[in-house]
Image (spheres, rainbow, N blue to C red):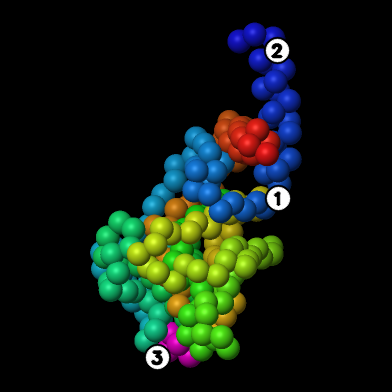
Amino acid sequence: MRTHHVAAFATLLAAALPALAVDGFVQSEADFKVINTGQTIQVQSFEGTPVQNGNSWTWGDVTFSCAGAWCNSGFGGITTQFGITDGAAAVYFGTPDVATFTFAKPIISFGIDVWGLASIWDTPTGSPMASALTITYENGSHAYFDGYAWNGDLGAPALFAGAWFGTPITSISITGKVEDDGIYFDRLQYVTAPVPEPGTWALMALGLGAVALRRRRSA
């Protein structure tokens, strides 16, 4: 490796490492995969038979649950009505209920396909209303797709919400913005928190740096 390449690598690594101490968010699956370079991304498609406990459904290390009036009346949980991404099953809930993903082991990143982020019913004008998706976790919250006013067609391409965490977390709660909005999820991706070894963090830092450089070049 040439000297100037080594210097560039060192600069990139130094710039990216501090970002690992804070949380970050993306709306691109491609960026999510780059950030998780070198990590094992696990996928939960909500296919197969879960273990159900009331309004809670568990597949392996992932549990989906919902709480609120809609969920208690049956509008929440598993749906097989739409073959959304990679099979017949997805999970869903209706705003203002709260949906929660809980993990058996702490995770450091989370990404998921999203549909339905626009209320088309019970709106003053009869037109779709923006319904931002907000995820809340142990140390804060983040709103996605604020102002996005149409993804009500479940045949449309999915939106993507991704996050990584400076401190490992075990659960994420999700809410919508507009009452009666039905929100659907599929193909959950996550990375279990590793034993913090220098090589692990260096690979993730490289991913963060690559995303930053790509965005800078496209600006």
Position of residue 39 measured from the top left corner of the image (x, y, whole percent): 49, 40
Q: Looking at numbered disc 2 in the image, what kind of residue is underneath it?
A: His
Q: Which residue is mark 1?
A: 22
* Foreground tag (1 vs 3): 3
The vertical placement of 96 against 168, above or below, is below
Which of pointers 2 and 1 lies earlier in the amino acid sequence?
2
Q: Looking at numbered disc 3 in the image, what kind of residue is underneath it?
A: Ser
Position of residue 68 measured from the top left corner of the image (x, y, whole percent): 50, 87
Disc marking residue 203: none
Give the structural element (helix, strand or loop) at label 2.
Answer: helix
Q: Residue furthest top?
A: 2
Task: Assess whether mark 2 and mark 3 are in contact (beta carbons under 8 angstroms).
Answer: no
Q: Which residue is mark 2?
A: 4
* Foreground tag (2 vs 1): 2
Q: Please indicate whether residue 28 sits to the left or right of residue 184 in the image.
A: right
User: Which span is picked out in magenta?
Assistant: 68-73
Residue under the image location 44 percent in, 53 percent down: 189
Q: Please indicate whether residue 204 sits to the left or right of residue 153 in the image.
A: right
The image quadrant of residue 214 is top right
- Find out whether residue 9 is within the magenta segment: no
Give the structural element (helix, strand or loop) at label 3.
Answer: loop
- Neighbour tally class for label 2: few under 14, some 14-19, many 20 plus, Cα within 10 Å: few
